[in-house]
Amino acid sequence: MRICHGTGSPDDPSGSVVIEPSETGVVNGHLVYNAAGALEPEEGHEGDIIPPFEYVNPKTKETVTYPGLNWPAGEATWENNCVAPAPTTTTTPPTTTTTPPTTTTPTTTTPTTTTPTPPATTSTRRLRRAPRR
């Protein structure tokens, strides 16, 4: 199986190399059983990236699934032959919203002209009739 073995180099503390031990080699060379009987990284191997795998527990003779070490956090590095991939950046283009201009039609009001009407007059004089001819 392929794992990323942390080099622990002072020049590159996060660096690792590809190695391909057997499952038994991973269990015996990179992991140790703790007091509860579970596997944990052996001292100096905390930076290894080990994918999940099945192995036979030598004490119980049962097939057990190991969940992985630094997994899934280190999966991209493991997939990239134990070289941390360059960080990806996403650039979102600016969004422009165009609103069409609104036009207002001017309203023209025609002025109203009022012509005063003279008051009606009444006369108390009697009109005469013209003589008949």
Image (cartoon, rainbow, N blue to C red):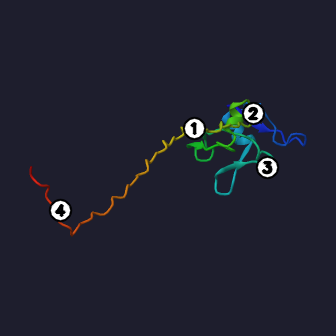
Of the residues under marks 2 and 4, which one precedes in the sequence? 2
Classify residue 98 by image quadrant.
Answer: top right
Classify residue 19 by image quadrant.
Answer: top right
SS for dot 4 = loop
Answer left or right for 72 relative to 129.
right
Which one is nearer the viewer's eye here, 43 or 55?
43
Q: How far is disc 4 from disc 1 in space, using C-alphas?
A: 82 Å
Disc ID at residue 127: 4
Of the residues under marks 2 and 3, which one precedes in the sequence? 3
Disc ID at residue 52: none
Of the residues under marks 2 and 1, which one precedes in the sequence? 2
Q: How far is disc 2 from disc 4 in space, using C-alphas?
A: 130 Å
Q: Position of residue 89 (x, y in %)?
A: 70, 37
Q: Nearer the viewer, mark 2 or mark 3?
A: 2
**Other-residue count near label 1 (Cα within 10 Å), few / some / many at <14 / 14–19 / ≥20:** few
Residue under label 1, please give it: 98
What's the residue type where badge 3 is placed? Answer: Glu
Which one is nearer the viewer's eye here, 47 or 96?
96
Spot the residue most to the bottom: 124
Q: Nearer the viewer, mark 3 or mark 4?
A: 4
Which one is nearer the viewer's eye here, 85 or 107?
107
Disc ID at residue 82: 2
- The N terminus, quarter of image: top right
88 vs 42: above or below: above
Q: Nearer the viewer, mark 4 or mark 1?
A: 4
Q: How far is disc 2 from disc 3 in space, using C-alphas?
A: 20 Å
Q: How far is disc 1 from disc 3 in space, using C-alphas?
A: 62 Å
SS for dot 2 = loop
Residue under label 3, please give it: 43
> Pointer 2 and pointer 4: residues touching (CB < 8 Å)?
no
